[in-house]
Amino acid sequence: MALFLINARDKAGSLELRMANRPEHLKWAAQFVDRIAMAGPVFLEDGKTMAGSTFVVEFDTLGDAEAWAANDPYALAGLFDRVEIIPFHWAIGDGKPNG
């Protein structure tokens, strides 16, 4: 399996939509802890206002990662302005998987 970096950025002014869908998003993501190497929200420059999501996930193909990301409740709710999904190699850092 390969790692993929998913960077999803919210549409401007959509914090209310994010918060309304957050419980379902977290519930959905919890089903895939075996595939998620790292995940969390990203913030605006104020360091407090959520503005997107970043994942490092493990899938066989880019298409599998794209299909998975498309089923994120945030994506289904139309939260994201843009989503980038690219192959990723974890070279250094705490928590780096063996291999």
Image: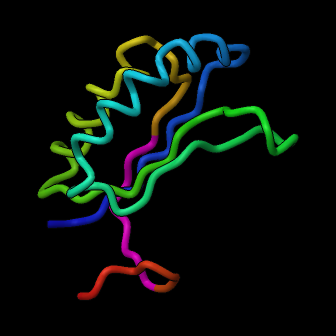
State the predominant SS element of the stretch in magenta.
strand
Classify residue 17 by image quadrant.
top right
Relative to residue 3, is residue 96 drawn left or right? Answer: right
Classify residue 13 by image quadrant.
top right
- Magenta includes 33? no
Of residue 81 and residue 98, the one placed in the foreground of this image is 98
Query: Residue 42's x, y, as percent?
Result: 64, 44
Query: Residue 24's x, y, as percent?
Result: 37, 22
Query: Residue 60's x, y, as percent?
Result: 12, 58
Relative to residue 45, is residue 67 drawn left or right? Answer: left
Colouring chosen for the image of the structure? rainbow
Of residue 68 and residue 95, the one placed in the foreground of this image is 95
| Residue plotted at (58% across, 42% down) | 41
Q: Can you say whether 92 is above or below 11 in the image? A: below
Of residue 40 and residue 68, the one placed in the foreground of this image is 40
Relative to residue 61, is residue 12 drawn left or right? Answer: right
Where, quadrant-wise, is the C terminus in this rendering? bottom left
Query: Residue 2's x, y, as percent?
Result: 21, 66
The residue lying furthest to the right in this view is 46
Q: Can you say whether 22 is above or below 95 in the image? A: above
| Residue plotted at (29% across, 64% down) | 3
| Residue plotted at (30% across, 41% down) | 30
Of residue 72 and residue 66, the one placed in the foreground of this image is 72
| Residue plotted at (67% across, 18% down) | 15
Where, quadrant-wise, is the N terminus in this rendering? bottom left
- Magenta includes 86? yes
Q: How many marks?
A: 0
Relative to residue 16, is residue 88 drawn left or right? Answer: left
Residue stretch in magenta? 84-91
